[in-house]
Image: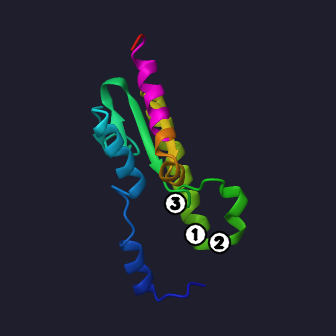
Amino acid sequence: MDVHTKEQRSYNMSRIKSKNTKPETIIFEVLRLSKIKFRKHYPVPGKPDIAFPKLKIAVFIDGEFWHGKDFNDWKEKITHFWLDKIGKNITRDKKNFNLLKKAGWTILRLWGRDVVKNPTKAYSKILKLLEKSYPGA
């Protein structure tokens, strides 16, 4: 049972950002400072937070709760509403990742807390993918 009214819950949910979150802006800034050109929220399945379209590299910076990181470890602790919502998000993510893979894209998923805790490590993962796409770079 939710402790908030339907109206309060709706208002609270409307305040949650889905674009330009703190983890995303951290990586955007690191890439800009490195003079690496990228596209934000590119219009392909899943709308990757960062895309390198010519290289077909998609980077998703996802929140652990919304995208179900380690879902099996904590799903018993949430209500049916959230179980259904997060389950659908996981299914949607898998579908989008499969569509991108079939179209020849390479996918990197970064978790928001990991990015905030260690932006350099997240940046290094992106660089490794870019270097693979440019042999000898």
Q: Which mark is residue 78?
A: 2
Q: Secondary structure at mark 2?
A: loop
Q: Quadrant of residue 37?
A: top left
Where are the magenta residues, as a range?
122-135
**Amino acid beneath label 1:** Trp
> Label 1, on which residue?
82
Magenta stretch contains residue 97 = no
| Residues tagged 1 and 2 counted as in contact (Cβ below 8 A) | yes
Q: Secondary structure at mark 3?
A: loop
Residue placed farthest to the top in the image? 136
Give the spatial CA distance, label 3 vs label 2: 12 Å
Q: Secondary structure at mark 1?
A: helix
Q: Quadrant of residue 81?
A: bottom right
Give the spatial CA distance, label 1 vs label 3: 9 Å
Q: Residue placed at 52% from the left, 56% from the top?
A: 89
Q: Is residue 65 left or right of residue 50?
A: right
Label 3 vs 2, first from the N-terminus: 3
Nearer to me, 137 or 93:
137
**Is residue 70 visible to us here?**
yes
Label 1 vs 3, first from the N-terminus: 3
Q: Mark 1 or mark 3: which is in front? A: 3
Q: Quadrant of residue 43?
A: top left
Q: Residue placed at 41% from the left, 73% from the top?
A: 13
| Image vertical order of residue 117 relative to residue 137, above or below | below
**Amino acid beneath label 3:** Trp
Magenta stretch contains residue 123 = yes
Q: Residue placed at 46% from the left, 19% from the top?
A: 132
**Amino acid beneath label 2:** Ile
> Label 3, on which residue?
66
**Is residue 104 visible to us here?**
no
Q: Residues within 10 Å of mark 3 (few under 14, many from 20)?
A: some
Q: Residues within 10 Å of mark 2 (few under 14, many from 20)?
A: few
